[in-house]
Amino acid sequence: MLVITDGSVVLLEGKKREYLVEISDETFHTDHGILDLGELREKTFGDIIRTHLGYEYTILKPRAPDFFRHCKRTGAPMMPKDIGIILAYTGLCPEDTVLDAGTGSGILAIYLGSIAKKVVTYEGNGEFVKIARKNIEAAGLRNVEVRHADIVSEMPRLRKKFDLITLDMKDAAMVVPHVKKVLKPGGFLATYSPFFEQTEDIRVAIDRGGFHSVQTLECVERKLEFTKRGTRPSTRVAHTGFITIARL
């Protein structure tokens, strides 16, 4: 049975709200009263903690989707539906090592790190690096390393080879020519781009690079809304980006 200790991050799930909190001696104010976070010590996942007003929260172990919803963001992260395509079409497994570029807030790295053996992720913005490292630390992932550097200039200097390379960055097409040097035979390249023009540049670079099994996909997700008037798809915009996957 897992015991919750200092520094742990847990998900508190109530009937109407949920919170991601770190165990400490502080109090935490919710919409339904105040929680003493110190009471979380020595509790286990599945236990109940109550606010001073008696409102109950169930203590849960957070997973990648929980960090997607609650982590501090530096911009628009890759959506779970798009991450799912990368995981499914590359067959990422626990023996794999991953090179990721365009860390942002670290959401993709958290998903990758929850499966892969090792993830090395690059981010050129120093403030983004700080946020990503904090988010990844909160996720309890010691197999994810965040490096503050420009992958375009760093890629030619890399000596290790990876099973999967993921690029979520504006200049992804500039990185593609260097991918073959650090990608294992049979390994995958996966890129994410929100615009047609950016995606076309990536495809041109991939076609020149000698990859095979190349495909570009768009995953359109529509949530259903259930109301008293009836059930219908949500009117939210379904497009987020294009995922291009290629194999060496």
Image: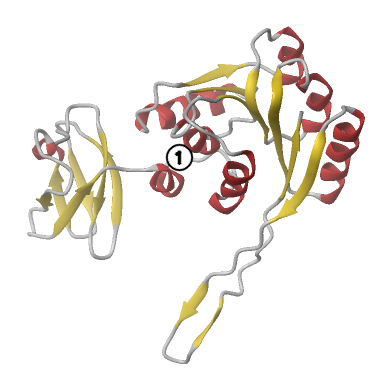
Q: Nearer the viewer, residue 30 or 64?
A: 64
Which residue is under mark 1? 72
- Label 1: how many residues lie within 10 Å, few (<14), some (14-19) or many (20+)? some
Q: Image point 39% across, 27% down: which residue? A: 141
Q: Nearer the viewer, residue 173 or 92?
A: 92
Q: How far across and down, in percent of the image, does residue 32 sit?
A: 18, 60
Q: How many labels does the image show?
A: 1
Q: Is residue 200 left or right of residue 223?
A: right
Q: How far across and down, in percent of the image, does residue 135 sit?
A: 42, 32
Q: Image point 24% across, 31% down: which residue? A: 8
**Which picture quadrant has residue 209?**
top right
Q: How far across and down, in percent of the image, does residue 189 sit?
A: 71, 32
Which quadrant: the C terminus? top right
Q: Which of 17 and 164 is in front in this view?
A: 164
Residue type of the residue flagged with mark 1: Lys
Residue 164 drawn above or below residue 244 = above
Q: Is residue 56 left or right of residue 197?
A: left
Q: Is residue 187 left or right of residue 21?
A: right
